[in-house]
Amino acid sequence: MKVIVAQTLDDLMKVMVIRGIVFMGEQKHPYNTEFDANELVNRTHLLALQDKEPVGTMRIMKDGKEAKFERLAVLPDYRGKGTAEDIIQAALDYCQEEKVERVFLFCKPELVKYWKDRGFTKVGGDKILKYGKMLLVPVMKQIQEKTSETYDYQQIPEILKHHPGEWINSSQDNMALIMREKLRQRNL
């Protein structure tokens, strides 16, 4: 497995095909939800290759000393084989080289443990993002030991505030929403 930074039009087309298969084909996301005006603006695309064949991807948005991981996608035949972990590690390595201090991402509620096992911590207090029919939990990983400032885990980070959707409390009232979303995702 090799993970590269997409640098050519051919690389970028491979990224888009993978995302189209996973997010539009499998998960039924509409085109305008999956692809946006930010594809080439302040974004780095990683591409995982197995024997020169594209098998996975992730998009990274960098903003100063912070970065946001977006749109991690792995083709079905390569899931459960370490592909996602290879992409995540390549993304973390890239961010360290770029002197990023903290990495953020949104994950589905059922994936919080997955990200926690990889050193990520929930941020934003009890807030979660409702984006379309999805509920997304904000998480963060400190990747530089020495940083310029301490981080308030109760606050919604600036790098995540501009994501479309509605911030809601993950209180008891919203737990029914979260459980329905988990059931919906399992039935896809």
Image: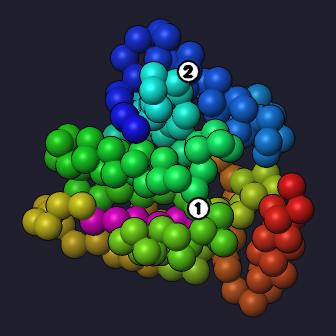
Percent position of residue 138, x then y: 52, 65
- Mark 1: few, some, or many residues within 10 Å (few <14, many ≥20)? many
Q: Up-down: is 108 above or below 36?
A: below
Q: Quadrant of the N terminus?
A: top left
Q: Decide whether residue 140 is among the magenta residues.
A: yes
At 40% from the left edge and 48% from the top edge, which residue is drawn?
A: 86
At 52% from the left edge and 24% from the top edge, which residue is drawn?
A: 53
At 49% from the left edge and 39% from the top edge, which residue is drawn?
A: 58
Residue linked to disc 2 = 14
Q: Quick one: 47 or 52, which is closer to the camera?
A: 52
- Is 51 placed left or right of 96 in the picture? right
Q: Which mark is residue 25?
A: none
- Is 24 placed left or right of 154 in the picture? right
Q: Please state which amino acid type lies under the numbered disc 1.
A: Cys
Q: Decide whether residue 72 is among the magenta residues.
A: no
Q: Quick one: 11 or 66, which is closer to the camera?
A: 11
Q: Are marks 2 and 1 in contact (CB under 8 Å)?
A: no
Residue linked to disc 1 = 107
In this picture, which residue range is highlighted in magenta?
A: 137-142
Mark nearer the N terminus (2 vs 1): 2
Q: Is residue 66 visible?
A: no
Percent position of residue 64, x then y: 26, 43
